[in-house]
Image (cartoon, grey):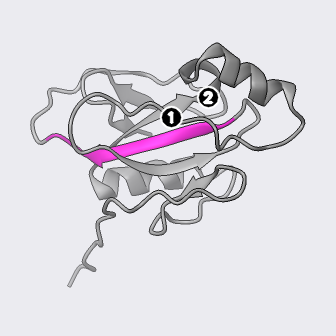
């Protein structure tokens, strides 16, 4: 009998002393686990979108972060994507500065329009232009 998949659900966002957050049910992916992460997102039936502090925050917030030598971004409130059902998966630092990952259940009906993903450091893959689903 196939193992039942426990679907991740929204959880309160409690940021640490540096302003970072990780959903308590998010698997612990290591650097280089891009394919494993994409497979988990697909298995969970999630639509995922990422916001970068550098392009999401007002200029003074972005300048403040990049001018400091500290990995603190608690003063950044990431924008929430338009639409219903979004919840935060993580706010974490990257080589390009902090990012926020938002997720929601994949809309049921989508006629996928796949395009090559072009995220820095995200590896190869495709993303649907309509619903933002990611596939390897």
Tell me the element at label 1: loop
| Residue pictured at 32% horizontal, 36% vertical | 133
Quarter of the view holding residue 106: top left
Query: In which quadrant of the rendered view does residue 53 lie?
Result: top right
Q: Position of residue 21 (x, y in %)?
A: 58, 55
User: Could you tell me residue 4's position as x and y percent?
Assistant: 24, 77
Tell me the residue at 31%/57% (across/down).
44
In reply to whether residue 106 is colored magenta, the answer given is yes
Q: Main secondary structure of the magenta part?
A: strand
Residue 135 vs 59, above or below: the answer is below
Residue at x 27%, y 51% (from the top left corner): 45
Q: Which residue is denoted by mark 1 in the rendering?
A: 78
69 with respect to 60 (left or right): right
- Magenta span includes 124: no
Residue identified by numbered label 2: 53
Q: For the residue carrying disc 2, how many other residues have a C-alpha within 10 Å: few (<14), some (14-19), or many (20+)?
A: many
Task: Decide: is 66 above or below 20.
Answer: above
Q: Quadrant of the C terminus?
A: top left
Q: Residue at x 54, y 22 (%)?
A: 56
Residue 103: give x, y in percent of width and height: 36, 45
Check whether the beta carbons of the residues at disc 1 and disc 2 lie within 8 A of each other: yes
Per the rendered image, the range of residues in magenta is 98-107
**Label for residue 129?**
none
Q: Is residue 98 above or below residue 60?
A: below
Query: What is the C-alpha distance between the residues marked 1 and 2?
Result: 7 Å
């Amino acid at each position: 009998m196939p193992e039942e998949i426990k679907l991740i659900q929204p959880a309160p966002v409690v940021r640490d002393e540096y302003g970072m957050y990780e959903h308590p049910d998010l698997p612990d992916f290591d650097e280089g686990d891009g394919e494993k992460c994409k497979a988990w997102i697909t298995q969970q039936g999630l639509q995922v979108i990422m916001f970068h502090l550098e392009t999401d925050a007002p200029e003074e917030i972005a300048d403040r972060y990049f001018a400091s030598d500290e990995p603190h971004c608690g003063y950044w409130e990431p924008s929430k994507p338009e639409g219903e059902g979004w919840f935060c998966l993580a706010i974490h630092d990257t080589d390009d500065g902090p990012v926020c990952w938002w997720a929601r259940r994949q809309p049921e009906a989508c006629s996928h329009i796949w395009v090559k993903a072009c995220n820095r450091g995200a590896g190869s893959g495709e993303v649907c232009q309509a619903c933002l689903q990611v596939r390897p």
